[in-house]
Image (tube, grey):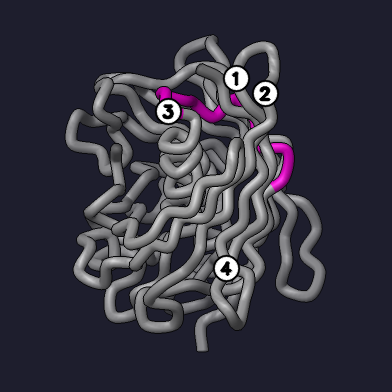
Amino acid sequence: MKYEEIKDLILQRDPIIMVDKLIEVDGDVAVTGLTVRADNYFIDEDGLLAEPGLIEHIAQSASAFAGYRAIRAGAATPPVGYIGEVKKFHCYCRPQPGDELRTTITMGAELAGVTIITGETRVLDDIVADTQMKIFIKPDD
Amino acid sequence: MLLENKYYKIINTKVDGLSAVYRIVLLPDCDVYRGHFPGNPVCPGVCNIETIKECAILLAGRKLQISTIKQCRLTAVASPALCPEVDVTVSLLSTDRGFTVTAKIADAERTYMEYKGDMIV
């Protein structure tokens, strides 16, 4: 299956694009990817990705999934999404430049514009971070 | 620090033991707003989380990393235009590996973020 370019699926732009591609969609589950580059916005003074960068990566992965669904449903542009809540976030280790993040997003039910998602990020077989999140998705107006 | 003097600037500090209030200015010229979002500058929630972490580092006087976020609620949209100055209130409670951090970002009118989680040294 072929997916849209990431800039067609999310509204974020440089310097804060934190997802490179939508790799797979199967029902309520999607897989995304990000290659961490040395010039990533969230690379901290110690050369590793700061934890909020992982949260943003998971949030934008969910946005890309929501954007994919909206566009497949006929929308001209992806919806605006805001993080409403981050819950049970764990950071197990911090990625470094060159690492390929693979993130699995599971989209829960939507209620009054709020969707609960879970995200899990790995580098190869190692878990890097996981979290639950509430995302407010505002349809394009 | 990743965002100090780039995304925010501290203009006043009140420390009382393991609690503090940092008055910050949200810097409207920060490059993050070019992308979040074009023509619609809104504070990325994760930049406010990083700001809380950096204030906790200042208060603790040592480098900290976020190990868990129990809960972080983003209760209002923030932007340099909507809330040019906000207070970041931080409290630390010692744990085996670092601190449990409770924090809030607010101004006189609204609370923008409520945060609780563990940071490790």
Q: What whole-number distance in Å separates the C-alpha atoms at marks 2 and 1?
A: 6 Å
Task: Count residues near mark 2 (Cα–Cα under 10 Å), then give few for <14, some for 14-19, many for 20+.
Answer: some
State whether discs 3 and 1 lie on one chain. yes
Of the residues tagged 2 and 1, which is closer to the observer? 2
Q: On the picture, is A129 further left or further right than A45? A: right
Q: Chain of mark 4?
A: B
Q: Which residue is mark 4?
A: B106
Residue A44 shows up from this direction: yes
Which chain is disc 3 placed on?
B
Q: Which residues are magenta?
A: B61-71
Residue A57 visible: no
Q: Which residue is mark 1?
A: B98
A54 relative to A137 in the view: left or right: left
Contact check, label 2 and label 1, Cβ < 8 Å? yes
Picture residue at 58% right of the left edge, 27% below the top: B119
Which mark is first along the chain, 4 or 2?
2
Above or below, B43 against B20 in this view is below
Residue B102 on the magenta segment? no
Q: Label 1's element?
A: strand
